[in-house]
Amino acid sequence: MLTVALTKGRILGTTVEMLQAAGFSPDEDVFDTRKYIVPDRSGTVRYLLAKPVDVPTYVEHGAADIGFVGKDVLYEAQADLHELLDLGIGVCRMVVAGPAGVDVAGVRRVATKYHRYAHDYFRKHGRQIEVIDLHGSVELAPLTGLADCIVDIVETGQTLRENGLVVHAELARVSTRVVANRRSYQLRAAEVDDFIDRLRNRVKEGVR
Amino acid sequence: MRVSQRWERPPGSHDFVREDMAHRRFIEAELMDEFGRFGFLPVETPVVEYAATFMQGIHQDDEERMYRMFDATGRTLALRPEMTAAVARLAATTLGDDPLPLRLCYWAKTYRAEGGRVHDRAEVTQAGVELLGVRGVEADAEVIAVMVSSLRRLGLRAFRLAVGHSGYVQSMLGSLPDALRAELRSALIEKDLVAYGRALVGGRRLVGEADLEKLAALPHIRGGVEAVAAARAAALDDGARAACDELDALWGALREHGVDEFVRLDMALYLHHEYYTGVVIEGYADALGYPICFGGRYDRLLEQFGREAPATGSVLHIERLMAIVEPRSGRPNGVRLRYAEPARPAAYAFARFLRERGHPAAVDVWDGAPGTDGAAADVGVFTLDADGRAVAEEKWLQLYEQYLQKEGDAPC
């Protein structure tokens, strides 16, 4: 039986729909926020419900065979695992944003929780930056002078606009990925391949 | 257990005591003996060598993670990050005049500055074999057979070795434009099939439709010997086809070794050491989430040290094995022998008697306090009181009887 780590929160509903379209039937308990392990009615899979940032950890250590997780989290975690499929859901943009007049080439302090994205982007443009580590309302940082700009994930850009910030550069498009543990990928190859193939067919057909 | 912050170990390093140590010793003895049964001779190389030795073909990440220092003349030294380069250096220099093939094995601690993840240890014990001087896949098959046989001897059953061919991957990517090749290569190393697929889509205009399909198939080719046929169907050039011939031949040899059921092909397996030139190996056990075994063919490493010779080898990651190998129980037959002051001559003599028969005996003076005095749970306690009375488990009392008889027999 495969253990599949799902992400609690915003994206869970879409993920479950996708699993159903692929022929799985997660128990309704999956939406019960107090339950952490939920069976699939097929008996071939069980689900583990974790915080997004923890999914790569569960999968890397083999506590879960497969995980559903955003590319943003995955990229920051640098976990050693197989990235097998882009589900094309939960699509967002990772951007550099700041007040309208800011010259991105002259930025020194960047507020973000996405350290790797920030360092990578500015390094590529020849700048070594100082990262101010923030975990929420990052938009505050440039408004209060704490940082010159921010690196953050945006879906519609509404929050940025409301705070008078504009997007200066797009670093990456992120979406939900399916990852597999290294041991499981080799020793449970048939089960993992079957699981991935069923999902892949849904992605191809554009079922959302 | 109290640990004051001042005396913590550096992160990623470990102490081994009691049953862990016994477990380690057991694994070491079994593995080195198994390697020996295949004719591999144990070698030891320095823990610290000139950094240049380790930089032959090492991946850049690992180079940055080497512990370095300077000797008195300012040359850069490093703690060995792995053993293959050191053994290649040894085979080309110290053993440079020995005829090939050479079969060498080792049990050695290696060091890498830890990357911060839980299972990234700074200090890793590697036990491995290197078979130098044989170009054919018989050598690769032998190395795989040694690994399978060693893992089985340690009691593991649910494990697999994934086998790939870095020559195949290099051939497949060889004719592509540099930027695309670099992208695909790094996606394979990162095991990121999404990035791999995306790079191919991006390179659509540079690669013909037919080739594109074959390249897209590459990372999905895995399975038993039948997967070699799939790899051949996807081959883009003679280099890739030659790699498939090798894999077919390898499977034949693995069957004859009786180990093919433990091996699976994975064409996307592409270990990141630059020195691999042919068959590559990575091993997994069902009970552990990360690999326990790494290896492969490195035909051009020895020439860096001045001796042209093909070579192949593989190592086991001991600390990971310790987590999954069942400890062999059987209580150590040692005893803590404590005596009240007047009984010291008898205590020392009995301890000698025990040691000569292979029973470990630790001897301490005893003040008559009750309890077992902090002896470890798996050690027997033998008490000789002031009146010469012995108190212990039956097994030790029997040995004491034998000792007394022998004493009585001895001419005074």
Image: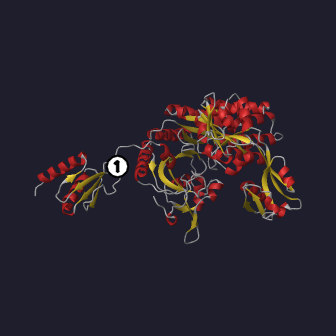
Provide residue A40's location: percent of width, then percent of height.
63, 31
Chain at tag 1: B
Q: Residues within 10 Å of mark 1 (few under 14, many from 20)?
A: some
Position of residue A78 relative to residue B216, above or below, is below
Furthest residue toward bottom: B72
Furthest residue toward right: A101
Q: Which image quadrant: the C terminus of chain B?
A: bottom left
The answer to whether B138 appears left or right of A180 in the picture is left
Residue toward you, A85 or A37: A37
Position of residue B157 relative to residue B50, above or below, is above
* Residue A125 in sight in this render: no
Q: Amino acid at mark 1?
A: Asp
Provide residue B286's location: percent of width, then percent of height.
54, 38
Q: Which image quadrant: the N terminus of chain B?
A: bottom left
Provide residue A76's location: percent of width, then percent of height.
70, 51
Judging by the rendered image, the residue that carries numbered circle 1 is B378
Residue toward you, B128 or B306: B128
Provide residue B403's location: percent of width, then percent of height.
18, 51
The answer to whether A28 appears left or right of B19 in the picture is right
Residue toward you, B330 or B357: B330
Q: How is the image coloured?
A: secondary structure
Residue A69: quarter of image: top right
